[in-house]
Amino acid sequence: MKLLLGATVALLLGALAVSWQGMNTGVKNTPPDEIARLKKQVSELRQEHDKLQLEKQIQQLKASAPAMPTPATNAAEIEAMKAQVEANKAALAKIEEEKAARDAKIEQDEEGLLGQRDLEKGDAELRRARLIAEALLMGRVKEYVEDAQYGGFITFDIAMPEQVQVGTILAIRRKTGILGQLKVSEVSAEGGIANPLPGFGPVQPQVGDELILPPQY
């Protein structure tokens, strides 16, 4: 289309130039009716040229204009949006379901805790066992060295260095009971040393026994 328009314009311009040149050269010898005919022809050529230029501009505008989406494209986009909305609804429903389950568990745990507290009001030993079981682990016994003169001592690994220092009182926990208490006499990067306090039970510490801070009953 572009080549056809260009060729047509070139031919029209050539004809216009030739006609105009011939008219100027022989204007003195040309009859008036011939001059009128040539002027009419020049006017028609100009109109044809303007028409071709207008058509060319229209074609260029059509070529540069963005393509309009087809109904099929619109339908596909709508379906994709619907699918996304449904996916969002499903995700929201799952979150709500998980929240409901979590709230139910929390409520159940709270009821269990309240029930435990009610039981402990009438049973001090039950409360004592719970506090011992919930106490944070400070370390574990590595070795027990028995000494008849000084009463022996233990070496232990430290689990929470920020809570254990020289002079700290620790208790040996076994299951939900306490065997006795010790006083830390030395702390180093390798571990610690602790000595049994008076009243330490008859049961000797064993490797792996847990050391805790004595809970306040």
Image (spheres, rainbow, N blue to C red):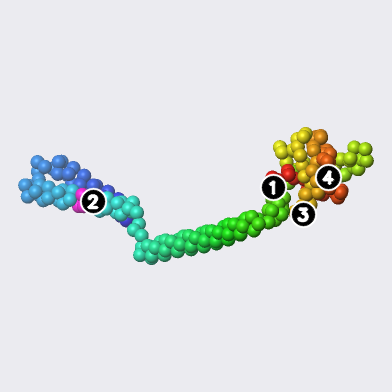
Give x and y (percent) for residue 155: 84, 41
Left or right side of 164 for 47: left
**Distance from the alpha carbon under mark 3 to that under mark 2:** 98 Å
- The residue at 25%/53% (across/down) is 55
Q: Residues within 10 Å of mark 1 (few under 14, many from 20)?
A: few
| Amino acid type of the residue tagged 1 in the rendering | Tyr
**Distance from the alpha carbon under mark 2 to that under mark 1:** 100 Å
Question: Which residue carries the number 1 mark?
Answer: 217
Give x and y (percent) for residue 36: 9, 48
Label 3: element kind: loop
Give x and y (percent) for residue 113: 61, 56
Observer able to see residue 58: yes
User: Which stretch did the figure color magenta?
Assistant: 48-53
Question: Which residue carries the number 4 mark?
Answer: 200
Closer to the eye: label 3 or 1: 1
| Of the pair 90 and 98, the residue shown nearer to us | 98
**Mark earlier in primary sequence (2, 4):** 2
Label 4: element kind: loop
| Of the pair 183 and 12, the residue shown nearer to us | 183
Question: Which residue carries the number 2 mark?
Answer: 54
Question: Which residue carries the number 3 mark?
Answer: 175
Q: Main secondary structure of the magenta part?
A: helix
Label 2: element kind: helix
- The residue at 17%/50% (across/down) is 47
Q: Residues within 10 Å of mark 3 (few under 14, many from 20)?
A: few
**Distance from the alpha carbon under mark 3 to that under mark 4:** 17 Å
| Amino acid type of the residue tagged 4 in the rendering | Phe
